[in-house]
């Protein structure tokens, strides 16, 4: 479980006690995952059905575990943390679903039972486990339920306990927490009541997460790394200071976030802009699509039988050194301007070729986008053609 389990339990219990929900209720909740999973556990135990609209940026692990728990997961194009103002986002979708009479949204962003859960549990636990010696309480900021509820309890015991909130910058990749801009949309974000507010960058959050796991053998997740880095930055290392930092969740649901943010752990993280990543995936799809590629033997037969126009998309130097006889040189970068020299008939047979069959995949995609129906990329390219002993030409 995660820190949200106590919130989910408290929200459902209060909703039952007040008569807001009753048996066979359908619940809907916009969530970055942990509240959803916690609500799933409570819902399964109590017989409620749960729908969670959430961002497709949320780690795959969380979306999968929710589905495994029987939740109806509605994936949306949204930022990592649901943004209340985004018309297509998780919160808007949840509101839309909640308008149906059979649905109820407990809404962790505005439901007092969220901070109340921490007032009833987290705050007292911290106070008792430190024997009242706690001097600083530090929490990462998501809905701000943790900091509000625990902070209120601790201040009531000792007004000198410093309450410190930690948040990531805009564009961060730390699941569960919100940037300042995103926080302004959360009802429980009350910075005037905090004694400190610290920003921790994405890189430092993941670096600290790695250190917690490696150096302390504590399997804590990225928002724990962020909170600890904030605590170390904000609290002086002085005798008498007893700082408590909340680690909201373990590392296990965050492998894909970690892979994207910590180098050297496995598959290379996707690079480039979203548009470049889209193009990369289209190229890889092309490579695996038998309708768009041909091995060199099949290409040779096709060349003999149908006399296709061979379009060589390499730079002129490479083309003049060795090429398939009769091929025309149209470097990939210049394809858009040279397109007017392509055959008029869209059913004309074409082959796209380069040195080894990589650039020619983009060539095929470009030609397909112009409507050419009979076009393939030669797998292995000119090199494989040459190695097979097929006729080759040079200038
Ligand atoms: C992993 C993780 N870290 C931090 C938080 C922030 O906690 P809170 O919403 O109480 O501010 C959450 C909340 O969803 C979370 O799931």
Image: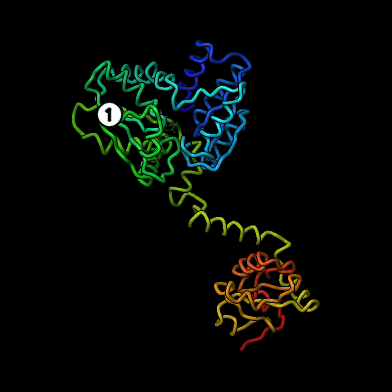
Of the four image quadrants, the one with ligand 1 is top left
Residue 152 position, x and y percent, is 31, 20
Judging depth in this view, the residue of 84 and 384 nearest the camera is: 84
Residue drawn at x 49%, y 25% as measured from the top left: 107
Residue drawn at x 56%, y 34% as measured from the top left: 93
Residue drawn at x 41%, y 30% as measured from the top left: 143
Q: Quadrant of residue 197?
A: top left
Q: Is residue 242 above or below residue 90?
A: above
Q: Residue furthest bottom?
A: 395
Colour theme = rainbow
**Residue of label 1:** 192
Residue 224 position, x and y percent, is 39, 35
Residue 375 lies left or right of residue 169; in this view the side is right
Judging depth in this view, the residue of 100 and 367 nearest the camera is: 100
Q: Is residue 347 above or below residue 157?
A: below
Residue 186 position, x and y percent, is 40, 31
Residue drawn at x 45%, y 38% as measured from the top left: 175
Judging depth in this view, the residue of 316 and 249 nearest the camera is: 316
Q: Quadrant of residue 373?
A: bottom right
Q: Secondary structure at mark 1?
A: helix
Residue 183 position, x and y percent, is 38, 35
Q: State how many labels appear.
A: 1
Quadrant (top left, top right, bottom left, bottom right) of the C terminus:
bottom right
């Amino acid at each position: 479980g995660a820190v949200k389990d106590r919130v989910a339990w408290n929200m459902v219990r209060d909703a039952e006690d007040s008569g807001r929900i009753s048996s066979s209720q359908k619940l809907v909740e916009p969530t970055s995952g942990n509240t959803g999973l916690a609500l799933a556990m409570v819902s399964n135990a109590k017989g409620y059905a749960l729908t969670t609209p959430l961002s497709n940026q949320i780690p795959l692990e969380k979306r999968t575990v929710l589905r495994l728990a029987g939740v109806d997961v509605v994936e949306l194009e949204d930022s990592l943390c649901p943004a209340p103002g985004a018309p297509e986002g998780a919160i808007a979708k949840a509101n839309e679903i909640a308008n149906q009479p059979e649905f109820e949204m407990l809404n962790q962003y505005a439901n007092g039972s969220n901070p109340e859960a921490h007032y009833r549990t987290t705050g007292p636990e911290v106070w008792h486990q430190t024997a009242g010696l706690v001097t600083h309480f530090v929490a990462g900021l998501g809905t701000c339920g943790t900091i509000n509820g625990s902070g209120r309890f601790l201040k009531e015991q000792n007004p000198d306990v410093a309450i410190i909130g930690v948040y990531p910058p805009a564009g961060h990749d730390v699941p569960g927490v919100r940037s300042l801009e995103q926080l302004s949309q959360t009802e429980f974000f009350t910075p005037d009541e905090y004694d400190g507010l610290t920003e921790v960058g994405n890189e430092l959050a993941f670096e600290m997460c790695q250190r917690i796991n490696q150096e302390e053998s504590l399997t804590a997740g990225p928002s724990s790394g962020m909170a600890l880095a904030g605590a170390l930055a904000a609290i002086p290392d002085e005798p008498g200071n007893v700082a408590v930092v909340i680690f909201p969740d373990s590392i296990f649901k965050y492998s894909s976030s970690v892979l994207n943010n910590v180098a050297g752990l496995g598959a290379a993280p996707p690079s480039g802009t979203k548009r470049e990543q889209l193009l990369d995936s289209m190229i890889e799809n092309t490579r695996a699509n038998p309708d768009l590629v041909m091995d060199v033997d099949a290409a040779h037969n096709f060349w003999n039988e149908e006399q296709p126009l061979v379009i060589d998309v390499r730079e002129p130097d490479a083309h003049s050194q060795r090429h398939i006889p009769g091929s025309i040189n149209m470097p990939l970068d210049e394809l858009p301007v040279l397109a007017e020299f392509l055959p008029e008939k869209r059913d004309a047979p074409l082959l796209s070729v380069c040195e080894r069959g990589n650039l020619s995949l983009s060539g095929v995609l470009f030609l397909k986008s112009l409507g050419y129906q009979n076009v393939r990329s030669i797998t292995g390219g000119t090199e494989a053609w040459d190695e097979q002993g097929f006729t080759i030409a040079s200038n």
